[in-house]
Amino acid sequence: MRDFVATARALADPTRVRILKLLESGELCVCHIQERLDMAQSKVSKHLRVLYDVGLVAKRREGLWVHYRLETAPLTACNLACLEYVARSLNSDPLVIADAAQDATPCPVAESAS
């Protein structure tokens, strides 16, 4: 029951649901999430930490940048059901559509690798 309550709390915040919807298209650097949500980096990082702590997202560090993606490792039944529900839901929500439609500027990691 503890895992369910923690996951439910994580999904109770609209910003965290928006982040999950953004990550459905693949891995994103924190700077891209920050840009698309028009939020401060510290606030975005706080939300990502909550999602990470409950096992809904995974992260990978590349130098100074951290990239997040939806977790694909063995998920709890609760997390799997929640991610599937989020994936099926809100696709016609105007805010989710606007978030997805934004073009992100190139990531500094990608620029330095070129």
Image (cartoon, grey):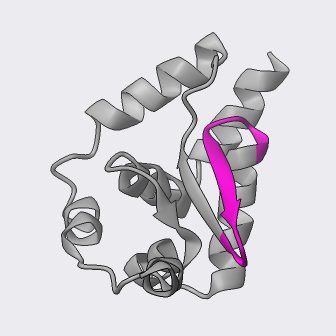
Outermost right residue? 2
The answer to whether residue 31 is left or right of residue 5 is left
Tell me: residue 83, above or below residue 17. above
User: Dividing the picture into quarters, in which one does residue 101 lie?
Assistant: bottom left
The answer to whether residue 41 is left or right of residue 89 is right
Outermost front residue? 114
User: Dividing the picture into quarters, in which one does residue 55 lie?
Assistant: top right
Q: Residue at x 27, y 45 (%)?
A: 90
Residue 55 inside the magenta-drawn segment: yes
Q: Residue at x 47, y 62 (%)?
A: 28
Is the C terminus in the top left, top right, bottom left or bottom right quadrant? bottom left
Residue 28 inside the magenta-drawn segment: no
Is the N terminus in the top left, top right, bottom left or bottom right quadrant? top right
Q: Residue at x 58, y 35 (%)?
A: 71
Q: In x, y percent, where is residue 111? A: 44, 86
Tell me: residue 35, above or below residue 86. below
Q: In x, y percent, where is residue 97? A: 20, 62
Q: Which residues are magenta?
A: 53-65
Q: In x, y percent, where is residue 60? A: 67, 54
